[in-house]
Amino acid sequence: MAIQIGGVKYIPGMYEKKRPTGSQLADKYFRDMDQKWIERKQKEKRPEIFPTICFSRKIGVGALEIADILAKKINYSVVDRGLLMHIAQEAKLSEKTVSYFDERYPGVLNEFAKLLFGEKSFIKSDYSRHLANVVLSIAGLEPTIFVGRGTHLILPRDRVLAIRCICSDEHRTERLARILNVGKKAAASKLPQIDKEQSEFFKKVFSKKEALPYEFDMVINCDYISNTQDAAEIVELAFKKKFAEELSSSGWTETAKAS
């Protein structure tokens, strides 16, 4: 979903940091995965689904920026909406992702899928099942932070710290205008279209009209916690508290990734 705002293309997840396209992200993701696969071949088997963080947000809030900061702190990878949708929509990439997981844990994906599809009544369409398989596979391959696409509704709830980022339309308008260097009026005029497209996706895939606060471990209001570094530190603390015993014995978060 790309929207023209004041003559500038806005892609959900944009902020001041320049990010590669979905295709470029996918290429890098699989190059990194190949290297990690080699390094892990001789290591002890990990749990099938790593402790995972899932960000849900109104588009334009700035959740991806928070996720990028957090990822460096806890040595996790970020899979945002663009990368996830690129993998899910490209048949060869989807097959590669699922095959990685199947090779590492033969039969486990089918077990998860049977359980998940039985519990989650919204997973009816071929697309929903396809997306669920990709999300499950990625979550099982490496410690991951997901941003967008309702991933907290797909993964086993006890393996997820689910975060909802909200803010006023005024905050979103100011942020989009600053990022795109366009007028606030132009940015504000596109919010209804952005929200409608996001709402239609959730209605189609999850049969949901809105995200209820009861779905999440934590809701962050970015009107009041506007500093992304502060927000990342809050989520980091909540994550380490929720999965304290597992994380302390795993060493996954001990060394931050090189920037």
Image: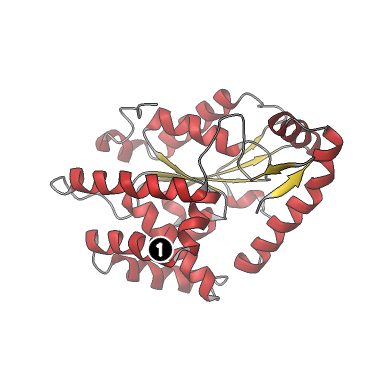
**Quadrant where the C terminus is found in the figure:** top left
The image shows residue 165, relative to residue 210, as above or below, that is above
Residue 154 rendering spot, x and y as whole percentages: 49, 60
Query: Residue 228, located in which quarter of the rendered image?
Result: top right
Q: In the orientation shown, which residue stands out farthest toward the right?
A: 185
Query: Residue 220, located in which quarter of the rendered image?
Result: top right
Residue 107 rendering spot, x and y as whole percentages: 26, 69
Q: In the orientation shown, which residue stands out farthest toward the front?
A: 7
At 30% from the left and 60% from the top, the residue drawn is 101
Task: Indicate how the structure is coloured in the image.
Answer: secondary structure
**Quadrant where the N terminus is found in the figure:** bottom right
Helix, strand or loop at label 1? It is helix
The answer to whether residue 53 is left or right of residue 198 is left
Let me know if residue 54 appears in the view: yes
At 25% from the left and 44% from the top, the residue drawn is 36
The answer to whether residue 176 is left or right of residue 144 is right
Instruction: Report the residue marked by disc 1.
Output: 94
Let me know if residue 120 appears in the view: no
The answer to whether residue 5 is left or right of residue 11 is right
Question: What's under tag 1, amino acid-wise?
Answer: Ser
Residue 8 rendering spot, x and y as whole percentages: 72, 40
Count up the numbered dots: 1
Q: Nearer the viewer, residue 33 or 58?
A: 33
At 39% from the left and 49% from the top, the residue drawn is 27
Crowdedness near tag 1: few (<14), some (14–19) or many (≥20) residues, C-alpha within 10 Å? many
The image shows residue 237, relative to residue 108, as above or below, that is above
Q: Nearer the viewer, residue 101 or 14?
A: 14
Residue 113 rendering spot, x and y as whole percentages: 40, 69
The image shows residue 250, relative to residue 225, as above or below, that is below
